[in-house]
């Protein structure tokens, strides 16, 4: 192997100190109590949702190791789950993650054009984040709202029956929200416990 | 005749709340089941009703329940599958957004019948709003004594919780769902043992779809025999159909099984015909996994009989000329839809969603996507078409879970019924390369993409 050894992003530990607030820890305790004794590993996906939301929008090895410790499981058990599910991001994302559905029913209703329009408008390609770290654009598979195609979600909030005008409005609204504080939407923590 | 079981009262304002739901007859079945019936009697009513799993497979629900292992003495679980992610299917989301107590009521009866004291609703992570609504509804039910210890003084205890996924189609498969509920990757398990023997935490478990469980309250209230009178033949009851694609009225419809497909597509009560007055080209009647059928085979069977919305009628003719009712995800394609592009789209979906456990599916879905990609982009060869059929045949039946079949069927069916479109793509690479979306004509109608 060459000098420059391949290093997976999972092994890059920054040694950041991460911890949930006492209030969040209380909520997590409630979530763990939903499962039988000794099965706290079941709380892994819900806890990762909360971690991702509260710790900057994406996961990294420091956060995952912390979650492993919290649930009393090995780090690899967290890594293998975090890499399997598409809602967990292992790369930094913008404040608003725009995920446009590109599967069949949305595709025949114009999803490709919506994606092209967003790429053009935000001046990024699918998979990228804007320079101001405000928007990340992703093309995802079926969001389960085919009756109101084309559909996209912005941080898991659905926007349906999209057209170019609607996209303009949504982006404009998000841009202005990012200046004033975003009106409080229920967080994962609140929804799950 | 219009019968509503699941969506009954859905138009009433505030039906999402426990108070309004109860005012309109909600939760009556709990009193009856928990106080006047034995668990076995509930199971028997469901057996008599002929109710079949509404998630896609159509397995008789009562029979599934009767397989649950009661001898081992291990705790039993009921898990509701709300990981709705089959392209074209959005009925469960609609139900849960609007009338969540219908599911909770059904789950209490079902858990009682199974002798389960713990139940979970597995909701896909993208449905964050649904999760909030469900948890709100569960809290209301706990407060009203409908959940928790000694429900309505019956001596029966049940804890119900929502569990969330995080974006994986495969977790809709019941054993993958259980793995995910245990906090693992969603890799399906080898069966047997079936979940009824070894399911969640190795304990006896029943996994049912949202819509299946939403029927249970009605069956307890009115009896299995009444339920069996609705529908046609072995397709009893009603079914939620989520209609989408190129139609005038996309949405969720509750139909009595046995409704003619033609009426469903063209009646203003349902789809309202093809959008823009265009000609119907094809329909996928049960979610993206089931075979696509061209117009002449979806409206009538190969024998010329009218095709009905039922498990039997839609699968008449096998895969040669039939399809499946599946999950009720009804996708309609108009004359301009490009079947090759659509098939490529779905194969990309299955490649993305394959868990990677079985080689035929992991490698096969990847190859199908690549080959379809080159045909769609004008770089295909004539022998690619048979190559696709061959790959599909090698995946089907050779994997642990049905995702392999689900990935193979749409490709095989598209080539079976629309081979000429694939050949056209190979023969006319220049034409194909210049069309970005559907047919050229259709593309022109979509506003040009411009910057800000």
Image (spheres, coloured by chain):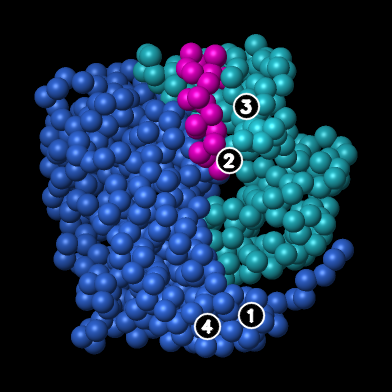
**Quadrant of residue B277 in the image?**
bottom right
Residue at mark 1 = B433
Residues marked 2 and 3, same chain: yes
Q: CA distance from mark 2 to mark 1?
A: 33 Å
The residue tagged 4 is B425
Q: Nearer the viewer, mark 2 or mark 3?
A: 3
The residue nearer to you, when weighing A183 against A32, is A32
Disc 1 to disc 3, C-alpha distance = 43 Å
Chain for disc number 1: B
Q: Give a yes or no on whether discs 1 and 3 share a subunit.
A: no
The spot of residue A117 in percent (x, y) is 75, 64
Secondary-structure class at tag 1: helix
Q: Label 3 belongs to which residue?
A: A11
Question: Which color was chain A given?
Answer: cyan
Q: Which residue is mark 2?
A: A87
- Is A122 situated above or below B194? below
The earlier-in-sequence mark between 4 and 1 is 4
- Taking the spot 67% from the left edge, 82% from the top edge, the residue there is B434
Q: Nearer the viewer, mark 3 or mark 4?
A: 3
Q: Is residue B6 visible?
A: no
Q: Position of residue A84 (x, y in %)?
A: 50, 39
**Which secondary structure type mostly characterizes the magenta part of the structure?**
helix
User: Mark 2 touching mark 4, by CB under 8 A?
Assistant: no
| Mark sitting earlier along the chain (2/3) | 3
Report the residue at 54% width, 14% height from top: A69
Q: Which residues are magenta?
A: A67-87
Name the image quarter holding residue A40.
top left
Which chain is rendered blue in the image? B
Dot in front, 1 or 3: 3
The chain carrying label 4 is B
């Amino acid at each position: 192997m060459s000098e420059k050894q391949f290093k997976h992003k999972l092994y890059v530990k920054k040694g950041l100190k991460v911890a949930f607030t006492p209030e969040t820890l209380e909520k997590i305790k409630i979530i763990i109590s939903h499962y039988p004794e000794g099965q706290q590993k079941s709380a892994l996906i819900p806890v990762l949702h909360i971690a991702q939301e509260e710790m900057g929008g994406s996961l990294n090895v420091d956060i995952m190791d912390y979650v492993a410790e919290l649930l009393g499981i090995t780090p690899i058990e967290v890594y293998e789950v975090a890499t399997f599910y598409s809602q967990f991001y292992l790369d930094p994302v913008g404040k608003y993650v725009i995920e446009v559905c590109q599967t069949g029913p949305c595709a025949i209703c114009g999803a490709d054009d919506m994606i092209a329009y967003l790429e053009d408008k935000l001046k990024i390609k699918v998979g990228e984040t804007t320079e101001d770290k405000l928007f990340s654009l992703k093309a995802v598979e079926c969001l389960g709202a085919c009756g109101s195609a084309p559909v996209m979600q912005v941080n898991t909030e659905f926007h349906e029956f999209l057209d170019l005008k609607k996209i303009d409005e949504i982006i404009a609204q998000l841009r202005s929200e990012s200046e004033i504080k975003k009106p409080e939407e229920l967080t994962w923590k609140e929804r799950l416990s | 005749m219009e019968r509503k079981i699941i969506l009954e009262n859905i138009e009433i304002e505030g039906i999402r709340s426990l108070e309004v739901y109860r005012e309109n007859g909600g939760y009556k079945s709990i009193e009856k089941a928990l106080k006047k019936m034995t668990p076995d009697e509930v199971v028997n009513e469901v057996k008599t009703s002929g109710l079949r799993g509404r998630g896609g497979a159509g397995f008789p629900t009562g029979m599934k329940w009767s397989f649950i292992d009661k001898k081992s003495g291990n705790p039993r679980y009921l898990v509701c599958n709300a990981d709705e992610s089959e392209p074209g299917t959005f009925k469960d989301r609609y139900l849960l957004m609007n009338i969540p107590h219908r599911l909770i009521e059904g789950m209490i009866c079902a858990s009682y019948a199974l002798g389960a004291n713990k139940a979970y609703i597995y909701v896909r992570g993208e449905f964050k709003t649904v999760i909030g609504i469900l948890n709100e509804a569960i809290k209301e039910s706990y407060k009203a004594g409908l959940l928790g210890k000694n429900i309505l003084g019956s001596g029966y205890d049940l804890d119900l919780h929502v569990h969330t996924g995080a974006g994986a189609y495969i977790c809709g498969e019941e054993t993958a769902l259980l793995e995910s509920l245990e906090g693992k990757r969603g890799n399906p398990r080898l069966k047997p043992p079936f979940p009824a023997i070894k399911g969640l935490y190795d304990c006896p478990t029943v996994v049912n779809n949202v819509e299946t469980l939403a029927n249970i309250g009605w069956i307890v209230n009115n009896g299995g025999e009444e339920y069996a009178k609705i529908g046609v033949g072995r397709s009893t009851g009603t079914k939620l159909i989520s209609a989408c694609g190129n139609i005038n009225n996309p949405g969720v419809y509750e139909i009595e099984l046995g409704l003619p497909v033609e009426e469903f597509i063209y009646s203003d009560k349902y789809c309202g015909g093809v959008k823009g007055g265009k000609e119907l080209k094809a329909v996928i009647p049960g979610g993206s996994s089931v075979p696509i059928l061209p117009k002449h085979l979806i409206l009538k069977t190969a024998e010329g009989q009218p095709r009905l919305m039922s498990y039997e009628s839609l699968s008449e003719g096998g895969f040669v000329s039939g399809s499946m009712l599946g999950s009720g995800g009804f996708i309609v394609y108009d004359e301009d839809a490009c079947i090759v592009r659509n098939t490529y789209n779905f194969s990309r979906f299955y490649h993305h969603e394959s868990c990677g456990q079985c080689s035929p599916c992991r490698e096969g879905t990847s190859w199908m996507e690549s080959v379809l990609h080159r045909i769609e982009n004008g770089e295909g060869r004539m022998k690619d078409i048979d190559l696709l059929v061959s790959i599909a045949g090698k995946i089907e039946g050779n994997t642990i879970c049905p995702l392999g079949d689900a990935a193979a069927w749409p490709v095989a069916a598209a080539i079976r019924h629309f081979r000429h479109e694939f050949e056209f793509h190979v023969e006319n690479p220049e034409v194909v390369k210049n069309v970005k979306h559907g047919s050229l004509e259709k593309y022109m109608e979509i506003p040009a993409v411009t910057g800000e």
